[in-house]
Amino acid sequence: MKKSIFIIIYIIMMFICGQPEFVLATASLEVTVRPNQILMGALYNGANISVMGNVPADSEVLIRLTGHLEDYKLKKKGRAMGVLWMNLGIVEIQKVPSLFLLYPSKAVNDSLQAGRQSWQDLGLGFEAVLKQANIVLDSEDKSALFEEFVKLEKKSGLYGTIKNTIHYKQGKGGMKSFSCTLALPSGLPQGVYKLDVFAIKDDAIAGYTSKEIEAKKVGMPAFITSFAFNHGTLYGVLAVLVAIIAGLVTGVIFKGEKAH
Amino acid sequence: MGGFVGLLSGIFGVGGGFLMTPLLIMIGIPPTVAAASDSNQIVGASTSGTLAHYHLGNVEFKMGILLLIGGVAGGTVGVQFIKILRHMGNADFLIQITYVIMLGFVGIYMFVESLQGLRVSKSIEVVAVPKKESKYAMILKKLPWQTNFEKSGTELSIVLPLVLGVFVGILAAIMGVGGGFIMVPVMVYLLRMPMHVVVGTSLFQILFTCINVTIMQANTNHTVDFVLALILLIGSTLGAQMGAKISRRLKGEQLKIILASLVLIVMVKMLMGLLLKPEILLAFVGGH
């Protein structure tokens, strides 16, 4: 009896330990992120984030940057009357991150490219996003549609796999140091982003840590965003007035030039 | 980009939304923000352009106001019509087909007509033979409330610009554009206005259409990016002034043939978009 209880407990423990999230909760890596706050002023045109840390010498690094979950309404294009390509309806893709950027080391990227099942089992890549996503549509291949969604987001620079950004240096005590510069897109929406750093060894997660990066509008853009959302009509009227004044001033300047 | 679109606006009396919005989307601006901010910058460009054309004596205010009244009424009807179509699920198809047919028809007609005009003015000496009045001209004369339009040098019934304004307003609402592209040929061929006055008057009308769109977008969708519009404005207001000066130097027929070529390029691009498989089969909701 005692033996069977022990076996059951052992099986349960093995099952729990096999889940990536459990591994994530226990193993920890030393990682520094600079800066951890991006201030998006009037001249913001993308930002660089420096990530540095130490991982076991025999492991490889994968960095993942994700945004909050969002719902999207999209137009679906298809063939009509066998000839014309046009919008055939609306598709809703729910519970997908607003940003999903992967920065794999060369070895991790090669493993990704090979499309090994073990990699998918880790639940770190785009497959994991598809799994948690809710795609509302009548009948169609959901993964094909999700692929199109990823293409669309990649075009905006908000999704993607950015290669050759992780660099290693020899460390001490069986460790090696790594550094990576994350280039964030200019179209980055305001919000708090989760930066996950994974140390991967033999297709399993050997170490993990998570940090937060905040992207915040400041100065004129922050004021304008708040004004536009809280006083829409007044904002519209002022935008029109400024445009008219700009047009009139240019007109007057040019008229002045003509008089000379 | 602002300068280039402003230049087109000043030369041809079109808003430039048909060019600027896709350009903005291409550089990564979300379609809804691109369309709304574009409307905002067109307000500046058309103010600047209208002023420049006013100084050149090219704005027929009376005609512009009549077309505007008709346009607002037509726009309201068009919006309701598009709502019904959306409900039936055929809206996008109808919008794109209307675009291709309208642009194709207007572009080809303008191109051929202005090409003939250029050839005639080059090769034949004009002999003063009294022209036989067309049936269309005779019908126009019979309409009530005839008014003199000084800048255009014509006498027309106020019913005609009102009715045509409604027609353009409906089409503009269906197609989701300011209507400059349709309004210019309507003024040239149906209202028989001289091309230079058409450009100035069209800009005057576009100014009000875009004021309406900007405020509506800011209030309903919060998609007007003022900073973006301001950056575009700097270029477009200057471009509109330069355009007005260039427009004055070109002959009416030359203006028409260049505009017709632009219209045909846009039409071909739209037709290709309908016939070729798109790179991505999904698109964000919104935009023109």
Image (spheres, coloured by chain):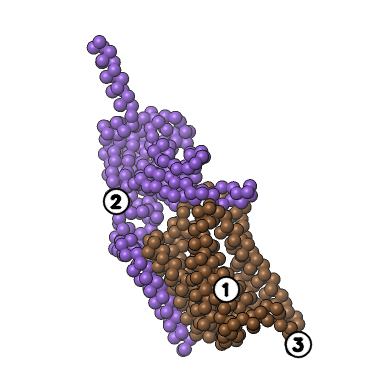
* Residue found at x 56% / y 47%: A78
**Quarter of the N terminus of chain A within the rendering:** top left
Residue B178 locus on image (x, y percent):
51, 68
Nearer mark to the viewer, of 1 and 3:
1
Q: Colour of chain B?
A: brown
Q: In this view, does B30 lie to the left or right of B164?
A: left
Left or right position of A42 against B43: left
| Closer to the camera in the image, A68 or A188 | A68
Vertical position of residue A192 compared to residue B264: above or below: above
For the residues labelled 2 and 1, the Cα–Cα distance comes to 54 Å
Which of discs 3 and 2 lies nearer the camera? The answer is 3
Q: Badge 2 is on which residue? A: A214
Residue beneath label 1, please?
A: B164
Q: Nearer the viewer, mark 2 or mark 1?
A: 1
Chain coloured purple? A
In the picture, the disc for residue B129 is 3
Q: Is residue B8 above or below residue A88?
A: below
Label 2 in the same subunit as label 1: no
**Residue A39 on image: x %, y %:** 30, 57
Amino acid carrying label 2: it is Glu
Nearest the viewer among A192 and A241 is: A241
